[in-house]
Image (cartoon, coloured by chain):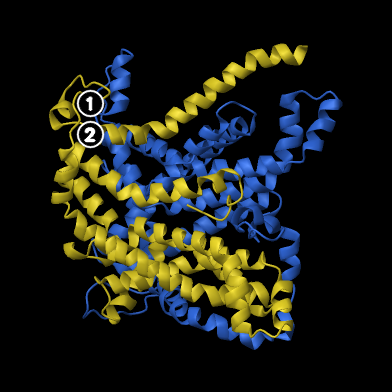
């Protein structure tokens, strides 16, 4: 089902069925050796800058590597992980990361589903609404953060101004307050990721066969029942795929929150990626930071496997 | 008739809900523009008016001065252009191979493409920094280009592979039968058909590099080699605390390429065609 998700549209000439046939085998009897030759230019940089660092990164998590040129690195086995067990600051950050990931993904999903359903209706100015729904996507994360810093500015921000107009005090320092900083950051996270989710769900809605809905309507099912018994089951694989992708993206999110709050106030918005960044590049504990990265990968990987398994069709969603 | 009455109640509600969504999604950008046009005095006003009373263009000129905007923008442009070119040159033959040959490569490449989309960069960045340090490429634009290229490749490869698979292989066979060499077939038949997909992939790569922040933050240290997102983020912590109008102006300028790109491709996005091809 991820074909809807990550496969680009076929070119202008061919239908999807056609493309599948064309890709079935080599053309004109050319062999696999040619394929390797064509891939080779890619392979060297990929090995050097992605596969090798990946493996070395995992290994680093089992060493006491430090920043700096003249340090010696020794293999320390599981010592990093034993130390990590009692390191409360890291687990606080991990907890914040999970709250952030689950909240942003959930809110994003329900809001996007509502918006996609509206955009799928035959409303006036639909083209305009569909265009505007893409706006957050066009703004890079750093600028999204700046924009919302302006919106949430305690004195001159639009949010507090509206609150004052409505008769509230309107003097909350949203991003500087222990209570409100994380919810405010979550709101910004939801805003910035909504277009991708909306567009994907909209594409899914458009692929639900019209006949199914008509048949159900003839059988006397109301629109609510049709939604829960026809539309939602048909969307299920797409929902599973997009929420999984959103979860991964949100958990790995960095630029947005770094620019928005830099993890503050008092570490209340310190996502794990920010925490590990500080550990590695502010304090120079490379080995320890890599160990944290490994823990993140394992926990999130496990979480995703369980989620996809519970979602019912792990094979289809992951492949 | 029941549905008719039902409709008369729900339709207005649907418009209200849609309107609320539009305000939520579009207003922050409008507000950025308003802020960029307001003079400092109005921004500090405890009872600010919504629209600027007088339009202040000096925010833009001040922002350009203070952020050394042209130097940074040139760095961003150079990095994004070179990344785009190299990525396309490397990805095109590989994408062709993945689209046209059925070998073990395909499974391997797909696995790597998926993995690279979900892997936390935070774990990559430390060893990547070490590799670049050994090559003396830390704090250079070349190092940044190398990293961006490698991490743009999976997605470019995936997009291009799809576009090439969409071009019928029969066309190539027909060309070969007419006696054209393989190179001529590729250049005269495949390339023109591939052009729209190629442009989309190239632009997407350009925009991703233009907007990228995390790698730049770690790898670039000298102010004269900063890219735009880096400069903006630094401006937030320094001048940007008070000079809100200038911060907004600089942000708007930096977002122009990205906004233009989305304006161009939005029709294809909303029609659901590209829905999966572009991931944020």
Total number of numbered discs in the rendering? 2
**Chain of the residue displaying label 2:** B
Which of the two labelled residues, at mark 2 and mark 1, occupies the earlier sequence position? 2
Residue at figure coordinates x 60%, y 30% from the top left: A118
| Chain A shade | blue
Q: If the image is split into quadrants, where does the N terminus of chain B sit? A: top right
In the image, taking residue A319 as reference, residue B200 lies left or right, namely left
Position of A144 relative to B216 (above/below):
above
In the image, taking residue B255 as reference, residue B275 lies left or right, namely right
* Mark linked to residue A309: none
Question: In which quarter of the view is residue A301 placed?
Answer: bottom right
Residue at figure coordinates x 62%, y 56% from the top left: A9
Asked whether disc 2 touches disc 1, contact meaning CB atoms under 8 Å apart, the reply is: yes
- SS class, disc 1: loop
Task: Please provide percent x and percent y for residue B28.
Answer: 36, 34
Q: How far apart are marks 2 and 1 (CA)?
A: 7 Å
Does residue A262 appear in this view?
Answer: no
The residue that label 2 is drawn on is: B37
Task: Please provide percent x and percent y for residue A128.
Answer: 51, 33
In the image, taking residue B52 as reference, residue B202 lies left or right, namely right
Task: Please provide percent x and percent y for residue B277.
Answer: 56, 56
Does residue B191 appear in this view?
Answer: yes
Tell which of A60 and A4 is nearer to you: A4
Residue at figure coordinates x 68%, y 16% from the top left: B7
Position of B197 relative to A197 (above/below):
below
* Mark linked to residue B52: 1
**Chain of the residue displaying label 1:** B
Q: Which chain is yellow?
A: B
Q: Residue furthest front?
A: B178
């Amino acid at each position: 089902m991820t074909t809807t998700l990550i496969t680009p549209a076929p070119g202008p000439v061919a239908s999807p069925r056609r493309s599948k046939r064309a890709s079935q085998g080599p053309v004109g009897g050319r062999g696999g050796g040619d394929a390797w030759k064509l891939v080779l230019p890619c392979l060297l940089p990929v090995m050097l800058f992605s596969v090798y660092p990946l493996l070395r990164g995992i290994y680093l998590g089992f060493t006491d590597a430090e920043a700096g040129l003249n340090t010696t690195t020794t293999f320390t086995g599981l010592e990093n992980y034993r130390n990590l067990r009692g390191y409360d600051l890291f687990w606080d950050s991990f907890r914040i990361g999970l709250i952030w990931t689950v909240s942003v993904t959930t809110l994003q999903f329900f809001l996007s589903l509502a918006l996609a359903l509206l955009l799928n209706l035959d409303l006036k100015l639909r083209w305009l609404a569909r265009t505007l729904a893409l706006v957050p996507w066009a703004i890079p994360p750093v600028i999204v953060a700046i924009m919302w810093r302006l919106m949430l500015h305690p004195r001159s921000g639009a949010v507090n101004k509206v609150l004052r107009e409505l008769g509230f005090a309107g003097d909350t320092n949203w991003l500087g307050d222990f209570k409100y900083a994380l919810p405010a950051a979550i709101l910004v996270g939801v805003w910035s990721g909504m277009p991708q989710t909306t567009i994907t769900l909209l594409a899914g809605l458009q692929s639900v066969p019209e006949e199914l809905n008509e048949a159900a309507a003839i059988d006397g099912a109301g629109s609510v029942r049709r939604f829960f018994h026809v539309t939602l089951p048909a969307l299920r694989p797409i929902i599973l795929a997009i929420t999984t992708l959103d979860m991964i993206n949100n958990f790995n999110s960095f630029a947005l929150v770094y620019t928005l709050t830099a993890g503050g106030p008092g570490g209340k918005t310190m996502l794990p990626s920010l925490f590990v960044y500080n550990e590695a590049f502010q304090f120079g504990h490379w080995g320890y930071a890599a160990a944290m990265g490994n823990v993140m990968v394992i926990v999130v990987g496990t979480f995703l496997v369980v989620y996809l398994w519970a979602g019912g069709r792990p094979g289809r969603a992951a492949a | 008739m029941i549905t008719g009455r039902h409709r008369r109640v729900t339709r207005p509600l649907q418009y209200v809900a849609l309107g609320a969504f539009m305000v939520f999604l579009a207003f922050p950008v409008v507000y950025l523009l308003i802020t960029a046009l307001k003079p400092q005095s109005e921004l500090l006003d405890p009872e600010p008016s919504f629209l600027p009373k007088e339009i202040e263009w000096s925010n833009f000129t001040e922002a350009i001065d203070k952020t050394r905007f042209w130097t940074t923008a040139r760095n961003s442009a150079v990095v994004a252009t070179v990344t785009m070119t190299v990525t396309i040159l490397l990805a095109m033959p590989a994408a062709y191979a993945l689209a046209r040959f059925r070998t073990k490569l395909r499974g391997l490449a797909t696995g790597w493409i998926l993995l690279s989309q979900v892997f936390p960069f935070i774990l990559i960045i430390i060893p990547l920094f070490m590799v670049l340090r050994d090559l003396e490429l830390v704090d250079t634009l070349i190092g940044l280009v190398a990293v961006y290229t490698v991490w743009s490749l999976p997605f470019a490869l995936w997009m291009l592979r799809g576009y090439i698979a969409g071009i019928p292989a029969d066309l190539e066979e027909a060309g070969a039968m007419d006696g054209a060499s393989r190179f001529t077939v590729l250049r005269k038949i495949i390339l023109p058909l591939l052009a729209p997909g190629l442009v989309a992939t190239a632009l997407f790569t350009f925009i991703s590099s233009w907007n990228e922040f995390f790698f730049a933050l770690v790898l670039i240290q000298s102010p004269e080699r900063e890219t735009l997102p880096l400069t903006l983020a630094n401006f937030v912590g320094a001048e940007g605390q008070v000079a809100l109008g200038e911060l907004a102006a600089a942000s708007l300028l930096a977002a122009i390429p990205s906004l233009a790109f989305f304006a161009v491709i939005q029709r294809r996005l909303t029609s659901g065609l590209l829905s999966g091809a572009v991931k944020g």
